[in-house]
Image (spheres, coloured by chain):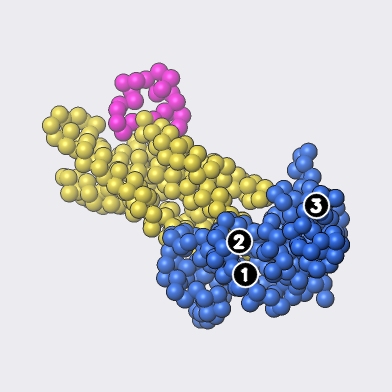
């Protein structure tokens, strides 16, 4: 837990992290709600938009975990810790555990802000917050994978720009994927982002059967990413 | 009593032989410097002795334990201050030291006492509350060494501790390293002649992964028939 506490402090004390991780999703929420107020689009209705924004916000967890691991590798901080009695599992849990409450905290803040914009609050919000856990695990694990092989600058480009954009485009938050269809739709369907958004929306509306349809692909990706992250981290640890 | 013994130690990276049949002994309480130009094999040697890199051939014994067969026991005896500063930048100096205390299993009371002791010894009181990442290079190195000393290691590896520091910061750090002499066995790598001469009990000169000469600064000067150490070093390296 000592190392996990350190990782949480490193992330939360970085003003850029707070700016992007929390500020950016909230700005989008406000902006798209303003657009909806002037030009009504069903996709941007607050009860349809907010679940999607919370899933989009999770993509920043990939950036946070990847940056932290890559920076620790580059600054030889990890090298120092590899000469201590810490074990592989201590490192992996230390990097992953603190990001889970941060991810859920971010989701809660999004829902609270959406309430101020007219979202009806109910117990379903709690289900929706908890429903984001598998996707949060996926995004955090993806970050651990990237941080294990990429440098800080590469992480900024790949996780900060490419992955956040890809996860947004392929999630169906900004536009209806059925309108694009074809290969794009098939690729989106094969990835977890759109399923996470659909499940989040379903949980928010307490539509359990619709939510259940999307559990498997998200859980599958989360498990796969977690296993791959552990393997890649231990591999680079051995290489050190 | 022998603190470190290497026996025909070899490290190969594909085509490159970074350390080539290194055999040396370091006595307990000794400050032994590995001196050489860039690429001489100093850092690779430290990496093998601190269990960060697996030797390709031969073996090394640290405190009587084999680095290849008993790395867990070796890790309990050693500490490393890497070439890079290797501090957690968003944590205060005190939090960095607390982190190392936690990793080494010290209780709250023990941590408080140990941090107070180290702060006094390394004159860190004035920066304890400051963020480590905001300190100058000299102070960061000092913090890095303090972090390495938390576990009261029998053997301390200092990899290029004054690299990139200005003259004043370098001399301050030398003064600090001198206070550690005798109680801890120190292996220091450097490519600064004056640093090796000023601090070391004995010096090993490396080139191309091989150990060319070992002795006190005076012995090496006599060996090369030179009055000053720098000329002696150049002469030994050129002949080697």
Residues behind callouts 2 and 1 on a single chain: yes
Residue at image point 76% right, 71% down = B201
Residue found at the very far left of the displayed protein: A38
Secondary structure under tag 3 reads: helix
User: Which color was chain A given?
Assistant: yellow
Give the residues in magenta: A170-191
Residue A149 magenta-highlighted: no
Q: Which residue is mark 2?
A: B162
**Image vertical order of residue B176 relative to residue A103, above or below:** below
Disc 1: which residue: B174
Outermost residue on the top side: it is A182
Task: Say which label, 2 or 1, has the lower sequence index.
Answer: 2
Q: Residue at x 78, y 38 (%)?
A: B15
| Residue at left offset 64%, top offset 46% | A235
Instruction: Determine the chain carrying the residue at label 1.
Output: B
Where residue B104 sits in the image (x, y, percent)? 59, 70
* Distance between the alpha carbons at the discs numbered 2 and 3: 22 Å
Q: Which mark is residue A231?
A: none
Q: Which mark sits nearer the N-terminus, 3 or 1?
A: 1
Q: Which mark is residue B237?
A: 3
């Amino acid at each position: 837990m000592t190392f996990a506490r350190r990782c949480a402090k490193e992330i939360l004390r970085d003003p850029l992290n707070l700016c992007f991780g929390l500020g950016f999703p909230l700005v989008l929420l406000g902006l798209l709600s303003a657009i909806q107020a002037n030009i009504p689009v069903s996709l941007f209705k607050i009860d349809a938009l907010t679940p999607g924004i919370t899933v989009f916000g999770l993509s920043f967890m990939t950036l946070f975990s990847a940056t932290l691991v890559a920076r620790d590798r580059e600054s030889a901080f990890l090298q120092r810790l590899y000469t201590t009695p810490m074990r592989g599992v201590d490192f992996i849990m230390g990097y992953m555990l603190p990001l889970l409450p941060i991810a859920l905290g971010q989701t809660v803040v999004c829902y609270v802000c959406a309430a101020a914009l007219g979202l009806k609050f109910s117990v379903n919000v709690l289900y929706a917050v908890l429903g984001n856990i598998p996707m949060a695990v996926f995004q955090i694990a993806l970050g651990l994978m990237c941080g294990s092989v990429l440098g800080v600058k590469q992480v900024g480009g790949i996780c900060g720009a490419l992955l956040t954009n890809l996860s947004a485009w392929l999630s169906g938050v900004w536009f209806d994927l059925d309108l694009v269809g074809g290969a794009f739709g098939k690729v989106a369907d094969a990835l977890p982002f759109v399923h996470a958004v659909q499940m989040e929306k379903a949980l928010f509306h307490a539509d359990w059967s619709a939510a259940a349809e999307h559990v498997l692909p998200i859980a599958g990706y989360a498990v796969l990413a977690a296993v791959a992250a552990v393997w890649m981290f231990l591999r680079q640890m051995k290489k050190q | 009593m022998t603190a470190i013994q290497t026996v025909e130690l070899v490290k190969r990276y594909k085509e490159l032989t970074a350390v080539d049949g290194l055999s040396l002994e370091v006595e307990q309480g000794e400050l032994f410097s590995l001196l050489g130009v860039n690429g001489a094999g100093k850092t690779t040697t430290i990496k093998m002795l601190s269990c960060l890199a697996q030797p390709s051939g031969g073996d090394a014994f640290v405190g009587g334990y084999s680095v290849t067969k008993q790395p867990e026991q070796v890790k309990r005896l050693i500490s490393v201050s890497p070439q890079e500063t290797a501090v957690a930048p968003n944590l205060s100096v005190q939090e960095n030291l607390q982190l190392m205390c936690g990793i080494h299993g010290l209780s709250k009371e023990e941590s408080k006492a140990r941090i107070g002791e180290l702060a006094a010894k390394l004159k860190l009181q004035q920066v304890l509350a400051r963020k480590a990442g905001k300190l100058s290079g000299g102070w960061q190195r000092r913090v890095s060494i303090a972090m390495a000393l938390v576990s009261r290691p029998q053997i301390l590896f200092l990899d290029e501790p004054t690299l990139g520091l200005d003259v004043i910061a370098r001399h301050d750090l030398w003064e600090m390293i001198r206070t550690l002499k005798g109680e801890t066995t120190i292996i220091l790598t450097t490519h600064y002649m004056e640093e090796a001469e000023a601090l070391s009990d004995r010096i090993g000169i490396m080139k191309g992964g091989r150990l060319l000469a070992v002795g006190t600064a005076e012995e090496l000067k006599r060996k090369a028939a030179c009055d000053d150490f720098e000329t002696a070093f150049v002469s030994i390296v050129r002949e080697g």
